[in-house]
Image (cartoon, rainbow, N blue to C red):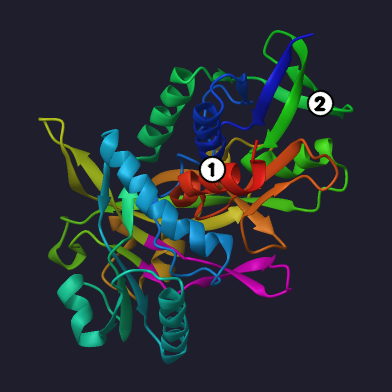
């Protein structure tokens, strides 16, 4: 039976960055990525807003706070070297009520603790010098936020993994894992057959399926992924002057996630329904910010039995209600449907999980909800340097 040195289950952005660093650190080991879908990164990695976060909102000294700040720098450097469309756009977080202003002040202090560079607190009169059609009583300006073409980023990682002799196997769904003394026996279902092989080291980077894979490795795996659908709409900012935008990401203050709590039984928060600029490709091959602005995500429960594009859709009015407090001129007729992205929310825990399995020393788990894309290279580096140590 074939024996593999290192196997990663899950070919999203976390699996790809981890395999990329492993392949460079261990060029003589066999490294395999198993992906259940036909294409890599086709669930959450490439079907969300593509925002590069700055790390302002996360608990100080957490992995999210540390690795988001580091990851923002790493991914922009990577994108520059490999000619992946990206741009540092800056971001406004807008408060529209006194209650939201109190929350904004809290996050301003947190951003300073997290060493987010060059943040600025804006008064109501200064907001419109950044974005002309916003309404608010105060805002945080965070210049290091940007956007990236996530599909191009993941495709480049896929190419680099294979160039470093990594093996990527799409449509290989893991159906059973049997721990052995010094290895794992994996059973896989492909479109044409059932296969088995052994691996010395197993890494769970399976995103939406991280809980089920984790429990195959160790029935006492403690973490719960709760997938949700994030729906997006879009509008053309040139339709009317009162829709015009200068190109910044615009967010409300963080919003509570219904039914979602952390390990301290405290309410978990998401960054809310926001406005994200998008790219246009120019005839000479260069990129610039385009006229289309992405709106979302609004979340709905995820049903794994139904393909994402058939899941129940939010109405334009649902989007309008969340936008009007800070972007009051948008109307239902301005919006067009864009996409649904699946988001892996880690329920009952508020940080990234990057650890050795509690029962098997040759198994590891990397669970990363938002800001996983931004942090992906830093997550992989942290895993190699502090957890894997192989």
Q: Is residue 20 visible?
A: yes
The residue at the point 20 percent across, 41 percent down is 280
State the residue in front, 307 or 332: 307
Q: Which residue is mark 1?
A: 380
Kindly identify the residue that appears in the image at 55 percent across and 57 percent down: 299
Residue 269 in the image: x percent, y percent? 57, 69
- Residue farthest toward the bottom in the current orientation of the protein: 98
Residue 127, relative to residue 366: is it above or below?
below
**Residue 80 image offset from top left, x and y in percent:** 26, 40
- Secondary structure under tag 1 reads helix
Segment colored magenta = 251-274
Residue nearest the viewer, comparing 67 with 121: 67
Q: Quadrant of the C terminus?
A: top right
Q: Which mark is residue 184?
A: 2
Residue 272 pos. (x, y %): 47, 66
Question: On the rendered structure, is 318 left or right of 63?
Answer: left
300 versus 44 height, above or below: below
Q: Secondary structure at mark 2?
A: strand
């Amino acid at each position: 039976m074939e024996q593999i040195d290192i196997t990663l289950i899950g070919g999203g952005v976390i699996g790809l960055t981890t395999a990329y660093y492993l392949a460079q650190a261990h060029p003589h080991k066999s490294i395999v990525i198993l992906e259940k879908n036909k294409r890599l990164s086709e669930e959450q990695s490439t079907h969300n807003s593509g925002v590069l976060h700055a790390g302002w909102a996360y608990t100080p000294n957490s992995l999210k706070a540390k690795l988001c700040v580091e990851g923002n720098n790493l991914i922009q450097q990577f994108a520059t070297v490999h000619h992946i469309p990206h741009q540092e756009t800056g971001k406004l977080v807008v408060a529209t009520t006194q209650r939201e202003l109190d929350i904004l002040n809290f996050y301003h202090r947190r951003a300073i603790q997290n060493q987010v560079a060059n943040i600025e607190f804006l008064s109501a009169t200064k907001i419109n010098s950044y974005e002309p059609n916003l309404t608010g009583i105060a805002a945080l300006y965070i210049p290091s936020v940007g956007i990236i073409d996530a599909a191009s980023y993941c495709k480049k990682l896929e190419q680099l993994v294979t160039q470093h002799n990594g093996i990527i196997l799409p449509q290989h769904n893991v159906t059973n894992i049997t721990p052995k003394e010094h290895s794992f026996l994996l059973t896989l279902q492909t479109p044409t057959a059932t296969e088995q092989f052994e691996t010395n080291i197993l890494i769970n980077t399976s995103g939406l399926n991280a809980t089920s894979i984790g429990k195959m490795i160790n029935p006492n795996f403690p973490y719960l992924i709760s997938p949700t659908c994030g729906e997006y709409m879009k509008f053309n900012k040139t339709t009317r002057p009162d829709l015009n935008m200068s190109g910044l990401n615009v967010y409300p203050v963080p919003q509570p996630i219904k039914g979602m709590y952390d390990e301290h039984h405290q309410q978990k928060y998401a960054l809310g329904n926001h406005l994200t600029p998008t790219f246009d490709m120019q005839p000479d091959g260069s990129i610039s910010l385009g006229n289309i602005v992405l709106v979302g995500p609004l979340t709905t429960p995820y049903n794994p039995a139904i393909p994402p594009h058939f899941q129940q859709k939010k109405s334009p009015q649902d989007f309008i209600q969340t936008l009007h407090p800070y972007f009051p001129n948008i109307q239902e007729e301005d919006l067009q449907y864009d996409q649904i992205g699946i988001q892996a929310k880690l329920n009952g825990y508020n940080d990234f999980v990057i650890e050795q399995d509690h029962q098997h020393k040759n198994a590891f788990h990397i669970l990363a909800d938002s800001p996983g894309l931004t942090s992906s290279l830093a997550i992989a580096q942290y895993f190699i340097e502090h957890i894997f140590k192989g």
